[in-house]
Amino acid sequence: MGSNVRRRDFEVGEQNFLLGFLQQGMVVVDIGAHQGLYTLLASKRVGTKGRVIAFEPSPRELGRLKYTLLLNRCRNVRVEPLGLSSSGGLAQLFVCLGRETGCNSLKPPAVSEPTKPVQVSLTTFDDYCERQGMFHVDFLKLDVEGAEMEVLKGATEFLSRKPRPILMCELADIRTEPWGYLSLEIYEFLAARGFRWFSVMREGRLCACEKKQNFHENLFAVPEEKLELVDDWIA
């Protein structure tokens, strides 16, 4: 990946928003960091006074993530080889063995290629924050292939403390179906806690996203206490 932070053909609107919104000194959490696209982008934007915490339980992706950060001399990133859920312990992560490496999941994913189960360690975000003394986060990316509700259930204490972070979250029913729920539940969970949902346009501007029955997209959840920070971004 070298020093080129962006992939210009991938989630263009999401990247454009982050490039404009993230500032020096911010704290960013990347849950489901994969091989490091958003971790790297955040690292470059928040600078030496900021920090990034990246969670990636897959041993294969973890190695590639660490290599990306080493190659780009990112010294403000803490990499955690953990999965996040509603409780701690050990679990099986189903690692995709073909091209769908972004579909690794704690449930057998809806892919046509073979998977390999590997044992990974889990914790809750609340427990992690308590252990690390981390009580302030500016931005949080959540993309865990259907486990989003489990992560949020393990972060209820964190989400009750204001000011809360802006979230970028994948809502995709094809990912949540193996877990037995609709991604509408993610929408309702955060809406009930005072978050407003926005979709993102290619240039990075946000537009209000109303509740609907089915989702297959990345959305931004902005807590009510931070709406003014995105005023200039709302179309």
Image (tube, rainbow, N blue to C red):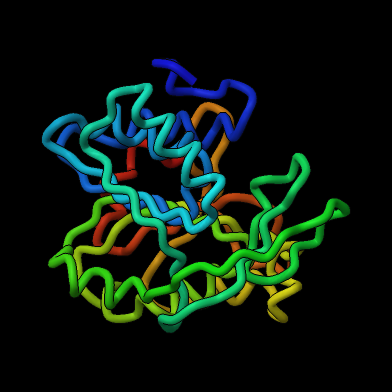
| x then y, percent, for residue 17 | 43, 34
Q: 120 or 216, which lies in front?
A: 120
Q: Nearer the viewer, residue 97 or 19?
A: 97
The residue at the point 72 percent across, 81 percent down is 180
Q: In this view, does 101 lie above or below 150?
A: above
Q: Residue 66, position in %: x, y?
A: 40, 38
Task: Give the quadrant of residue 115.
Answer: bottom right
Which residue sits furthest right?
Answer: 112
Question: Which residue is at the front of the view, 202 or 41?
Answer: 41
- Give the quarter of the image for residue 74: top left
- Residue 6 coordinates in the image, percent (x, y): 48, 23
Residue situated furthest top in the rendering? 3
Q: Which residue does the image show at 46% across and 65% down from the upper left? A: 83
- Counting from the top left corner in percent of width and height, residue 99 is at 75, 39
Residue at image coords 57%, 29% = 12
Residue displayed at 56% across by 69% down: 119
Q: In this view, does 19 lie above or below 129?
A: above
Q: Is residue 98 left or right of residue 143?
A: right
Q: Is residue 77 at all visible to an observer of this figure?
A: yes
Q: How many labels does the image show?
A: 0
Classify residue 125 as left or right of residue 196. left
User: Image height check: is 143 above or below 71?
Assistant: below
Q: Judge from the rendering whether residue 161 lies leftward or rightward of residue 199; answer left or right.
A: left
- Report whether residue 190 is seen: no
Q: In this view, does 31 lie to the left or right of 132?
A: right
